[in-house]
Amino acid sequence: MFRNYIKIAFRNLWRNKGFSAINISGLAIAMAGVILISIWIQNELSFDRFHTNEKDLYKVWNSYRSVDGHISNGDVTSAPLGNALVDEFPEVIKSARIYWSANRLFSFEDKSIKTKGNEVDKAFLTMFSFPLLKGDAEHALDDVNNIVISETFAKNLFGDTDPINQILKVDNEESYKVTGVLKDLPSNTTFDFDYLTSLKTSEANAEWGANSYYTYVQLQPNTTIEGFNEKIKNIVINKSSYKWEVFLYPFSRSHLYGYFENGIETGGRIETVRLLALIGGLILLIACINFMNLSTAQSQKRAKEVGVRKVIGAGKSSLIGQFLCESILVVSIAGIIALGIAVVALPFFNQVVESSLSINFGNPLLWLGLVVFIIFTGLLAGSYPAFFLSSFAPTKVLKGSFKSAKHFFNPRKTLVVLQFSVAIILVVATMIIYQQINFVQNRDIGYTIDNLVEVPIEGDIGKNYDLIKNELINNRAITAMSKTGWTVTLDASSSSGFEWDGMNREEEPLNFSLYRTGGDFAKTMNLKLIEGRDMDFTLFPNDTSSVMLNKKAVETMGMTDPIGKLIRSGSNKAYTIVGIFEDFIIDSPYEEVRSMLVLGSDKWNYNSLIRLNAENSTQANLKVVEQVFEKYNPAYPFNYQFVDRQYAQKFKNEKQTAVLSTLFAGLTIFISCLGLFGLAAYMAQNRAKEIGIRKVLGASVAGIIKMLSKEFLTLVLIAIVIAVPVSWYVMQQWLMDFTYRIDVGWIVFMYASVGTILIALLPVSFQAVKAAIANPVDSLKDE
């Protein structure tokens, strides 16, 4: 019997080549999209879950309460915190800090390579499951001048030479001994390093108020995290004057969830995962709806077949089995094609999601999943046609009196309305996401971002800094240059350990974003000074004890006439306020600007900020800058970054969501149009005799096209009525996550609606014209 089903299925597919091609192509495209989305989701859900101790690994966070009661959270902590947790709480097995990623120059014999890595505590290698191909994880970082490198880094630098115990020259100054070779990091980890060295920070000089490290802890198995967080929350308060609380957050959740709003977890990347999962499900559902519509569109052709089979004894269950078998066959063909499409589209998809996903054809779970996916889709797509076609009464269809229902609302039309409602919602969502991104990108960031370049201070740059700066200015390649602690697009350090005259000591301490500069900061950034002056170490050598404040800090501190007043740090060093500048964005452009202190400093400056001369071309300026840096720092390759490109990375997730929404919204509309094509074919087929009679009685082609198109246009209009309020509500909820957000205007819904109508009319008009110009003799000759 099953063999007979397959034969009949192939005959029907071949007999109706056009409908079969549309059916299979629609399903294949949808299934390919679902396969790509599934691969991406699986990768996202697996982030940081491969560690042996995954269930017991936690990241330490701080919780700050501002003077207005607002709670903010940060995952950058102070140096002593990790060891204090180990020493005082038996639930903590070990802790490890990790310092900011740094690009350093490594030399071995005549070869030099610059790559990224981190300073970490030695426990890092035993807490996390990054296997060593060579070396002992327990002792690889025992010495401060030990280094562990990745497999690829080892191969690039040492070639076939065994790297273990080899001596590397780092930044042409320090010598490190290679004590381990790490297997290359997997793609599903939040860490990104090619080397690890032992953290050199001295605990004796570490301050509780200087937050500059990520801290991780490993707890005893089965520790109740809620109760433990209650025990540790006041550890910083009890040991210092800083009044912020501490809590642990599961490390494996950080990638997907680590967003907090007023102290409450509000999601994170998981929202994008859920969105794509929903879109994938909708695309598959819409493709299945198309299959149903196209299958039932051929109902009259199959009606007599069903009638004859019933007369000769076929039961309803037998017919249902036959039609479901045909459906699964069609989906199987589509599934094979979909896998091919997914393979071809995967490189493009990887560019969009900025990943390196792959399809592991050697994994039996892949093929098992594909088989289950095909069977599920086949049953879903074929269920309605199977029950619909098997329900025909043989007496009616064999007499030729079979007629399908002419109710305005029937399952097929309802499903088409659902299709286009979903398509319109996705189109509206895509347009609003792009509008929000453009709105925030056009927000005044507080400084001139064009022609601003950052060059790391490394090698001989520090000692030759003044020579480099003067030569570049004299060559008119730049107009200003400043030493800075780190990039101006990253809120990398904060502290609440500052006091000033007139402060309210009963309120929670104010937490400041900290920045350090070696002078000319406002000039180089092109900040607007409200009061006072910029820092200038040439004219004012004592500016190492000066501080500049942003407008937000002055307002929050409640200061009047701040110039000349003192601010004291937790180490009791006094800074004189010399300037007040307008707020500028250093962290998220979607949030309010925080209070900021810019401290004068002649050390801890690892970055140089350069303002290129706008009178020259960028290429000409960079050529001169490169020549000067190579002149005074010949051992290092010239490395620079444009600040505007770094700033653009802040929109990465939203842009990625927008691109994916655009891609899949277009896919949804395309597949929905296939559904309209099928329904139009069905309606034209059912009304063939009516159209023939109307033409014989003198109806024009335009009149018939209008008659057939009107009903489909009505369905799309109903979809618009449903989709507009739903999309408005959904996107309003999405926008609520942003402090700075657009107001959703009616023009978005108008564009989406008109565009959808025009696109939907294309397949409908094609079928309408085809039916209108058909010879009436063909439809009336059997009367």
Image: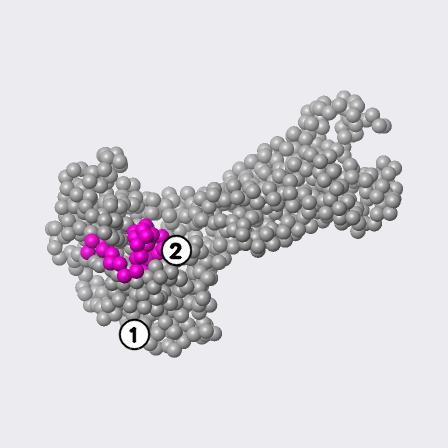
Label 1: which secondary element = helix
Which amino acid type is shown beneath numbered disc 2?
Asp
Looking at the rendering, which quadrant does residue 141 occupy?
bottom left
Q: In this figure, which residue is indicated by the disc labeled 1?
A: 239
**Residue pictured at 64% horizontal, 43% vertical:** 333
**Residue pictured at 38% horizontal, 78% vertical:** 90
Q: Is residue 31 left or right of residue 216?
A: right
Q: What's the magenta region?
A: 147-173
Distance in Å between CA atoms under marks 2 and 1 = 40 Å
Residue 382, x across and y down, in percent: 70, 47
Between residue 359 and residue 286, name the one nearer to us: 359
Q: Does the magenta stretch include residue 151?
A: yes
2 or 1: mark nearer the eye: 2
Residue 374 at least partly seen? yes
Q: Is residue 90 left or right of residue 602?
A: right
**Residue pictured at 12% horizontal, 55% vertical:** 541
Q: Is residue 186 above or below residue 201?
A: above
Residue 710, x across and y down, in percent: 68, 33
Looking at the rendering, which quadrant does residue 625 occupy?
top left
Residue 158, x across and y down, in percent: 30, 52
